[in-house]
Structures are given as structure tokens and as C-alpha cells.
Image (cartoon, rainbow, N blue to C red):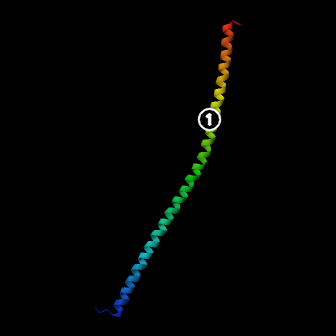
Amino acid sequence: MNLDVQSLAAMAALIGLSSGSTLWAVRSMLRRQSAEIAAKLDELDDVRDDLAKHKLSVAETYIRREDAVIFFSRFEQKIDSIWNFLHERERRGS
């Protein structure tokens, strides 16, 4: 196999061009993937903030409901005691 200097130079240039274009393609792909990952991380931060706000509101709503249940339970007990008092009074004939 007889290779002259021009053939070697052409092959070296072709290899250099090929590896340069491959390197460019890989860098371009990595930049695009990096931008997509950054966007998804920002979206996850937004979701995390929304979830934190929701957790706070759920606890507040739960406490309000629990307070309402306690209030109505006590209210019902008072109504029952008034009813029992009136019923007992009526039964005695007073």
C-alpha cells in the first residue's frame, strides 16, 4: 500500500473533521438535555411549593372541621339535656 503525504493529510483532515463534528453533535445534545433537565427541575420546584401550600391548608381545614364537630357535638348534648329536662318535667306534671 503506497500512501503519499497528500493522502495522509486528507485522511487526517477527514478524521479531524469527523471527530470535530461528532464532538459538536455531542455537545449540542448535552446542552439541549441540560436545558430540558433545568426546565423540569424548575417545574418540580413549583410543584413542591404548591404541595407545601396545600399541606398547610389541609391542616387548617382539618382543624376547622374538627372544631366544628366538637362544637356541634356539644351543642347536641346541650339540646339533649334541655329536651330531657323538659321531658322529665312534663312527666312529673310540674
- Residue 58 drawn at (x, y percent): 60, 42
Position of 12 with respect to 49 (left or right) is: left
**Amino acid type at image mark 1:** Arg
- Residue 84 drawn at (x, y percent): 66, 16
Residue pointed to by mark 1: 65
Q: Is residue 7 above or below residue 35?
A: below
Residue ID at (67%, 12%): 88
Where disc 1 sits, the SS reads: helix
Instruction: Look at the image and tell me in which quarter the N terminus lies.
Output: bottom left
Residue ID at (65%, 30%): 70
Q: For this rendering, which residue is in front, 62 or 53?
A: 62
- Residue closest to the far left: 1
Position of 48 with respect to 92 (left or right) is: left
Position of 50 with respect to 17 (left or right) is: right
Residue ID at (57%, 49%): 51
Q: Is residue 11 above or below residue 92?
A: below
- Residue 8 drawn at (x, y percent): 36, 89
Residue ID at (63%, 41%): 60
- Residue 39 drawn at (x, y percent): 52, 60
Instruction: Look at the image and tell me in which quarter the C terminus lies.
Output: top right
Q: Quadrant of residue 18?
A: bottom left
Q: Quadrant of residue 42?
A: bottom right
Q: For this rendering, which residue is in front, 84 or 64?
A: 84
Q: Quadrant of residue 81?
A: top right
Give the class, few, some or many, for how many residues have Cα within 10 Å of label 1's Cα (few <14, many ≥20): few
- Residue closest to the far top: 93
